[in-house]
Image (cartoon, rainbow, N blue to C red):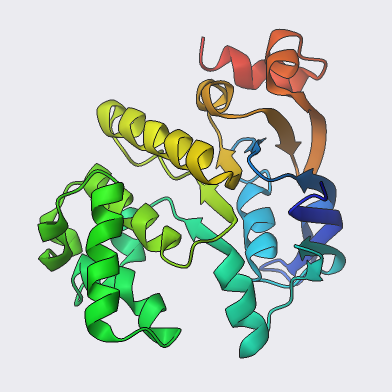
Amino acid sequence: MSPVVIARDLRRVFAGPDGAAVTAVDGVSFQLGAGECLGLVGASGSGKSTVAALVMGFDRPTAGSVQVHGREVRCDRGSAARWHYRHIQMVFQQPQASFDPRRTLGRGIAESLMNAGVAAPAARERAEELLTRCGLPAAFADRYPHQVSGGQCQRAAIARALASEPSVLVCDEATSALDMTAQSQVMELLADIRGQRQLALLFISHDMALVQQMCDRVLVMSDGRIVEEGPTAHVIGNPQHPYTQSLIDAVL
């Protein structure tokens, strides 16, 4: 089976405050298969979120490419963007901030469906179904982001991401803003959804313990580069790079 996501030699260079070039991502390559969970781990500033932005098409690489289902990801609008976001969605670090505070959770979930031509009543019904599937009462469709807890809001964000029935889900520090109980619940939800739908999951984190729990393989990033990669059990059980060891030591 062909990989769902292929990243080849990704490089992203920004202009720093003084005008000097800053390389955020430097030669990153990986593949992600259907039903697989790939961990991308590293400290803040290692380049993880930039990789996520490139995979999502939020940003354009300076060099290299990303393909989803064989089609190159571009920072496009129109039909190309609609096709892309039917297949790949993202769950963000701050769930409340990812919703429009002026709209209910149900409207936030239903919006992508209505944009795709689904009538408002059917989109509302689908939003309620998704909330229930993610472990929330259907009545939460009428609540605003500030009226629910962080864990509940993140469940709603996952429901929103699933609305288009994507084959790839990018989770960028999706549990780091939650308390331990909510974090555990969201991790369990993601694992269940992955198993049910053969969802390809790119799980971005700074926490090796979460990656060990969730991921089949792991890429370790430092200063924009992948310094170690392999099956999660092998990398954590026998780290070859000092930076990987330092990440493991931080959670012991």
Q: Determine the residue positioned at 56% across, 52% down.
A: 170
Q: Does residue 103 appear in the picture of this structure?
A: yes
Between residue 75 and residue 27, name the one nearer to us. Answer: 75
Is 236 on the left or on the right of 7, as rendered? Answer: left
How far from the left and from the top, in percent, is residue 114? 36, 83
| Residue 38 pos. (x, y %) | 66, 37
Q: Can you tell which quarter of the image residue 176 is in?
A: top left
Q: Position of residue 66 (x, y in %)?
A: 79, 62
Q: Relative to the observer, which residue lies in front, 51 or 165?
A: 165
Asked which quadrant contains residue 179, the reply is top left
Above-or-below relation of 13 to 239? below
x 67%, y 43%: residue: 46
| 231 or 204: nearer the viewer | 231
Residue shown at 58%/42% (left/top)? 204
Q: In the displayed structure, does residue 204 sit left or right of residue 75? A: left
Could you tell me if residue 77 is visible in this image? no
Tell me how many marks there are.
0
